[in-house]
Image: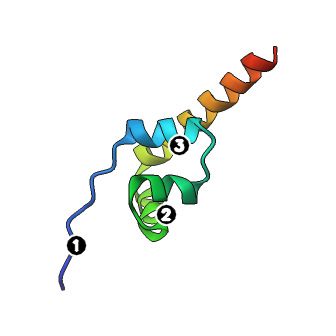
Amino acid sequence: MITKPKIHIDLKQVESLAANGLTQEQIAAALGISEQTFYKRKRDNIEFIDAIKRGKAKGIALVTNKLM
């Protein structure tokens, strides 16, 4: 069986993209990976999921602060 080399994904970039309100499909495109790779990494990597959650929380906090 041939295995592909694991693609390095910068979690800080993932967090930043999520903070800017991008959808998961848009984040995958911005990272230059397929949606399949995005969802596989999300399924297999807790740090990846945490980066998305942190980013979304930062984005919501920023919008909330602007509204106040």
Could you tell me residue 16's position as x and y percent?
49, 35
Instruction: Estimate the spatial distance between the alpha carbons at disc 3 and disc 2, rounded to whole Å.
Output: 12 Å
- The reply to whether dot 3 and dot 2 touch (C-beta < 8 Å) is no
Instruction: Estimate the spatial distance between the alpha carbons at disc 1 and disc 3, rounded to whole Å.
Output: 24 Å
Please count the marks in the image: 3
Query: Residue 53, located in which quarter of the rendered image?
Result: top right
Query: In front: 5, or 46?
Result: 5
Q: Secondary structure at mark 2?
A: helix
Residue annotated with mark 2: 39
Quadrant of the frame with the C terminus: top right
Q: Residue at x 63, y 31 (%)?
A: 59
Could you tell me residue 51's position as x and y percent?
47, 39
Q: Residue at x 60, y 28 (%)?
A: 58
- The reply to whether dot 1 and dot 2 touch (C-beta < 8 Å) is no
Q: State whether residue 10 is above or below residue 67.
A: below
Could you tell me residue 52's position as x and y percent?
53, 43
Q: Residue at x 33, y 50 (%)?
A: 9
Label 3 crowd (10 A; few <14 / some 14-19 / many >=20): many
Residue annotated with mark 1: 4
Name the amino acid type tagged 1: Lys
| Res. 52 mark | 3
Label 1 crowd (10 A; few <14 / some 14-19 / many >=20): few
Could you tell me residue 17's position as x and y percent?
51, 41
Query: Residue 60, located in which quarter of the rendered image?
Result: top right
Name the amino acid type tagged 2: Tyr
Label 2 crowd (10 A; few <14 / some 14-19 / many >=20): some
- Point out the tag, 1 or 2, that comes first from the N-terminus: 1
Name the amino acid type tagged 3: Ile
- Outermost right residue: 68
Q: Secondary structure at mark 1?
A: loop
Query: Residue 64, located in which quarter of the rendered image?
Result: top right
Quadrant of the frame with the N terminus: bottom left
